[in-house]
């Protein structure tokens, strides 16, 4: 009966340890944020609506929480969009109704390119 206090002490220490681990896990998750993004799926080439989880500290995307392309919204793919977005590759869909002026190739439009542009014909430099 003299060792009963030792068992109670070990049980209490285990409970405190469990609370500490759970609290640290919750605090570690607090810096993640969810955002809704419309992008072009790199696998299918179709516009999809995704809920992306991003790391609030680094700004990098961590995973896709939901995707409109998949039944039930649960992503079962390799999440290539996350990898490409973190590399800085834009996957935003092109909406012709909302797009701004498109870049014009001077060689195609008949406009003269500025001196030093790669579109200049070979020859003597412009004065």
Image: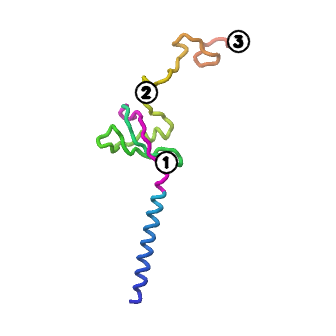
Q: Using the image, determine if residue 105 lies above or below residue 35.
A: above
Q: Which mark is residue 29?
A: none
Q: Residue at x 45, y 41 (%)?
A: 83
The mark that comes first in sequence, 3 or 2, is: 2
Residues at circles 3 and 2 in contact by the CB criterion of under 8 Å = no
| Magenta highlight range | 28-45
* Residue 36 is a magenta residue: yes
Q: Using the image, determine if residue 49 lies above or below residue 4.
A: above
Label 3, on which residue? Answer: 127
Position of the N terminus, as image quadrant, is: bottom left
* Residue 83 is a magenta residue: no
The image quarter containing residue 51 is top left
The image quarter containing residue 80 is top left
Q: Is residue 53 left or right of residue 70?
A: right
Q: Dot 3: what SS? A: loop
Q: Nearer the viewer, residue 27 or 7?
A: 27
Position of the C terminus, as image quadrant, is: top right
Q: Residue at x 44, y 33 (%)?
A: 91
Label 1, on which residue? Answer: 55
Picture coordinates of residue 33, whole percent (x, y)? 46, 47
Classed neighbour count for the residue bearing mark 2: other residues with Cα under 10 Å, few (<14), some (14–19), many (≥20): few
Q: Residue at x 29, y 41 (%)?
A: 71
Q: Dot 2: what SS? A: loop
Q: CA distance from mark 3 to mark 2?
A: 40 Å
Q: Dot 1: what SS? A: strand
The mark that comes first in sequence, 2 or 1, is: 1
The mark that comes first in sequence, 1 or 3, is: 1
Classed neighbour count for the residue bearing mark 3: other residues with Cα under 10 Å, few (<14), some (14–19), many (≥20): few
Label 2, on which residue? Answer: 94
């Amino acid at each position: 009966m003299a060792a009963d206090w030792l068992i109670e002490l070990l049980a209490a220490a285990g409970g405190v340890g469990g609370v500490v681990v759970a609290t640290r896990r919750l605090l570690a998750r607090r810096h993640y944020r969810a955002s809704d993004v419309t992008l072009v799926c790199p696998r299918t080439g179709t516009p999809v609506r995704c809920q992306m989880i991003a790391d609030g500290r680094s700004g990098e995307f961590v995973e896709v929480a939901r995707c409109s392309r998949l039944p039930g919204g649960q992503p079962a793919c390799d999440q290539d969009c996350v990898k490409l977005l973190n590399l800085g590759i834009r996957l935003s869909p092109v909406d012709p109704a909302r797009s701004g002026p498109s870049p014009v190739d001077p060689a195609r439009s008949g406009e003269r390119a500025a001196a030093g542009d790669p579109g200049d014909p070979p020859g003597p430099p412009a004065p």
